[in-house]
Image (cartoon, coloured by chain):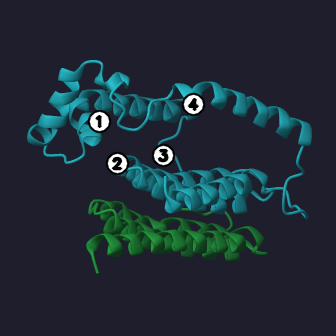
Amino acid sequence: MTTELINDIFLVAAALFVVLAIAMFYRAVAGPTTQDRLLAVNVLGTNTVVILALLAAGLDQPWFLDVALIYALLNFLMAIAISKFTVERGGVL
Amino acid sequence: MSLVAYTLAVFILLTAIATALFRDVLSAIVVFGAYSLGMAILYTYLLAPDVAMTEAAIGAGVTTILLLLTIARTSRPPTDQLFERINVPAVVVVSGFVLVMLATVLPDMYEVGSQTAPAWANEEVTQYYIQNAYDDTGVQNAVTAVLASYRGFDTFGEAVVVFAAGIAVLLVLKREVFV
C-alpha cells in the first residue's frame, strides 16, 4: 500500500468519527437529564482527541497532536465543574 | 474543503442551533462545550493550531466555568418544555440580514494562498517573516511567531489591560477575591 492510500484511509476514518460525533450529539440534545448530556459531551471530547490524532496522521501534521493533548487534559475540567455544580448546588471551584 | 470539513460544518451548525434553542441554561452550557470541540477541530483542520489551542483552553475550559459561576449566582426558572419557542418572523429577518451581509462580503475575500491578497502587497516584508520566523523566534508556525514573538509587546499590553480591568472590578466591588 502506498502512503497516500494510508493517509486517505486516516482521513476517511476521521470523517466517520465526525459522523459518530453527530450521532452522539443526538444524545446531548435528547438526553432527558443534564447528566446524560454531560456524559454525551464528555464522549464527544474523547472523540475529538481521536479525530485530531487521525488528522495529524492523515495530513502529516504532527503538531496537531499538541492540540489533541491539550483537549485530553481539558476535557475533564468541564465534567468535573458541572458534576460539582449539580451535586453541591452552586459550588463550582 | 473535504469530507471531514463538510461533516464538521454540519456538526457545528447543529450544536450552535441547539445552544441557542435550549430553554434550560445548564443544558445550553453543556451543548456549547460540544460546539467548542467542533470549532477546535475545524481550526486545526484549517492549519491554525494556535487558534485551536486557544479555543480548547478558553472554549472548553474557562468559558464553561465562568458561565457555571454566573448561573450559580442567579436563579434558573424551572421549565417544562425542552426548547425555546421560535419566533418565525424574527428568524426570517435576522437570517435574511446575515445572508445579505455574507453575500456582499464573501465574494470580495481572497482565496487561501492567493498571490493578489493584501498580505503580498509588500512582498519583502512577507518574505522576511516567512524566511526568518523560525531562526528569529524558534516557533515553527509563522502566524504564532508573529503573534507571540514579533508582536510580543502588543500581546503584553493586552495582558496589562485585562489585568487592570480585573483590579478595577475588585475595587468597584470592594472585595479581595473574584469567586
Q: In this view, does A50 lie to the left or right of B90?
A: left
Give the Cα distance between marks 4 and 2: 24 Å
- Name the image quarter holding residue A11: bottom left
Numbered disc in front, either 4 or 2: 4
Residue linked to disc 2: B50
Residue linked to disc 4: B106
Kind of element beneath mark 4: helix
Residue B49, percent from left and from top: 35, 52
Q: Are marks 1 and 2 in contact (CB under 8 Å)?
A: yes
Is residue A42 depicted above or below B77 in this figure? below
Kind of element beneath mark 3: loop
Give the Cα distance between marks 4 and 3: 45 Å
Which residue occupies the foreground of this view, B33 or B168?
B33
Q: To which chain does the residue with label 1 belong?
A: B
The residue under label 3 is which amino acid type?
Answer: Val
Residue linked to disc 3: B177
Give the Cα distance between marks 1 and 4: 25 Å
Q: Are marks 2 and 3 in contact (CB under 8 Å)?
A: no
Per the rendering, the mark at residue A38 is none
Tell if the residue under mark 3 belongs to the same chain as the one under mark 1.
yes
Is residue B1 depicted above or below B155 in this figure? below
Q: The cyan chain is which one?
A: B
Give the Cα distance between marks 1 and 2: 10 Å
- Name the image quarter holding residue B149: top left
Residue linked to disc 1: B147
Give the Cα distance between marks 2 and 3: 31 Å
